[in-house]
Amino acid sequence: MDMLSLKIVTPEKIVFEDSVASITVMTQNGEITILPHHIPLVTRMRAGELCCKKNGEEIYLAASTGFLEVRPGNQVIILADTAERVEELELQKIESAKIAAQKLLEETQGADDVAFANALAGMERESARYKVAIKRRHPKTPPAPLNPKTS
Amino acid sequence: MAVQTRAIKRRIKSVTSTRKITKAMELVAASKMRKAVSAVLGTRPYATLAWDTVKSVSKVTQIDLHPLLYTHGSSNKILLVLLSSDRGLAGGFNVNMVRKTFERLRAWEGKEVEVICIGRRGAHAMKKAGKNIIASFTDITTAPTYKDTLPIGRLIVNEFVKGSYEQVFVAYTDFVSAIAQQPTIFQLLPLGALEESKELGKVSQTTPVEVIRGSREYTFEPSPADVLNFLLPKLIETMLYQAVLESAASEHSARMMAMRNASEAASDMIHDLTFTYNQARQAGITQEIAEISSGKAALEQT
C-alpha cells in the first residue's frame, strides 16, 4: 500500500517525520483529509487538531497556523508556527495559557489591529491545544472515521 | 645581565595576562556559539523546506500572481543585504565576507548597487568602498531574534515592490561547522526568476527534494493569491532570519577559533620566552662565577 511521507516542521525543530496512511488537518476552507496520490496542493492551515493514521493507529497533534504542501511523489510537508504531539501537552499549563490568552484578547479589543490579531492568534492556538489535550485525557469511543479506509 | 632577565620576565608576565584574556574570550564565544548553533540547526529544516516550497510553487504559477514574484519597473539597480558582525576579533570572518562581496561587486560592474548593512564591520567596509548604504542595522547579530529581523524584511519588500530594485541579494556567512564557515551570496528576490543559488546550510542537507516538473499545476486553497499573499512575505522573513542566524553562528565560531589560536600562540610564546629567560639566567650565573673566580685568582697572584 502506498503511504504518505509526512514531515511536520516548526521554526524550532522537526516535530514529526514518518510515513502515514492519511492526514487530517484544519485548513482555511475547513477540515481536509489527504490520502496517497493526492494532487500537488498548497494550502493555509488554521490552528487546530491534526490527525494522522498509521496502521490503524491514530496520532494526534495540536498545530497552529501554517502551510501544508503536498508534493508530487506522496510527500507532505507541514510548515507550522507551532506543533506539539499529544504526549507533550500538559492540560494544566494549557488551561492557564488559555485564560491568559483570553484576558489578553479582551484587553487588546479595540486597541490596535496588530496586537488584537496577535492575541486572537494566541487564543486560537491555545484553544486548539486545549481541545486536543482534553480529547486525549477523556478518551471517548473512537470518533467515526472521517474518511473511507485506505487499505 | 640582570636587566635582560628582568625584561624577559616582564614580557612573560604580559603574554600570560594576554593569554588569560584570550582564553576568557574563547570561553565566552564558545558558550555563545553553542546557543547560536542550536538555534541555526533548529530552524534550518524549516527554512530549507519553506524555500523549496516557494521555489517549486514559483516555477509552476503565473508570475504575475504576486508582486514578489517579478521585477517591477525598469530599474536595473541591485540591492545587496550584507551580514557581518558588530565586533572584530573574529579571525577571518568579516574579511572573508567583505572579500566575497567585492568579488561579486566586480561581477556586477556597470550596475548600480545599493547596500543594506547588518553589522558594523560590513558597514565600515562598504562606506570605505564608497557604496551607497541605504540602511545600517547594528546590535542584531550577537543574539538575533525573529522580531529584530522583521523591519529589515519589511524594508526590503517595500522597496522591491515600489520598483526601486531589479534584484535583491543576501550576502551572509554560511555555517558549515565550528571550524569552517563559507561566505555565500544568494538571490532573495524576485522569487519568480531565481538563479541557481546555494542552499542555506548545505552541509546538513541531504539531496534536496527535486520536484517533478511538467504541466502539473499546483492547486491552491482557498485561492492562489490568498496563499501566496500569506506565504511569500513570511518566507522572505524566514529566509532573512535564517541568514542572520547562520551569520551569528559563524561569527561566534570564527571568534572562538581565533581566540583559541591566539591562546595557543601565547602559550608557545611563553614557552620560548621561558627558555630564553633560563638561558639568560644561566649565562648570568656563569658569568658571575667567572668574575668571582678571576677576581680571586687576581688576589692570589699579588
Image (cartoon, rainbow, N blue to C red):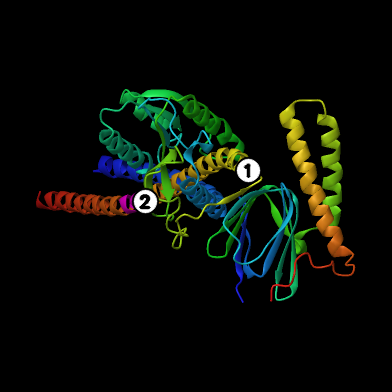
Could you say which disc has been placed on residue B223 in the image? 1
Q: Nearer the viewer, mark 2 or mark 1?
A: 1
Q: Is residue B226 visible?
A: yes
- Which chain is home to disc 2? B
B192 in magenta: no
Task: Identify the residue shown where x is 39% and y is 32%.
Answer: B122
Q: Earlier in the sequence, mark 2 or mark 1?
A: 1
**Residue in front for this viewpoint, B127 or B225:** B225
Name the subunit of mark 1: B
> Is mark 2 in CB contact (under 8 Å) with mark 1?
no
Circle 1 SS class: loop
Q: Quick check: B24 left or right of B127?
A: right
In the foreground, B26 or B282: B26
Foreground pick, B48 / B15: B48
Q: Name the image quarter holding the C terminus of chain A.
A: bottom right
Residue farthest to the left? Answer: B301
Badge 1 amino acid: Ser
Give residue B72's position: percent from left, percent from top. 44, 28
Counting from the top left corner in percent of width and height, residue B3 is at 27, 40
Q: Amino acid at mark 2?
A: Asn
Q: Is residue B97 left or right of residue A134?
A: left
Q: Residue at x 26, y 34 (%)?
A: B106
The answer to whether any part of residue B139 appears in the image is no
Name the spot of residue A62 as percent of width and height, x first. 75, 56
Mark 2 and mark 1: Cα distance apart in space: 56 Å
Residue drawn at point x = 79 percent, y = 51 percent: A128
Residue range highlighted in magenta:
B261-270
The numbered mark at residue B261 is 2
Residue at 82 percent of width and 41 percent of height = A101
Quarter of the picture holding the N terminus of chain A:
bottom right
Q: Where, by quadrant of the figure, is residue A59 drawn?
A: bottom right
In terms of secondary structure, what is the magenta stretch mainly?
Answer: helix
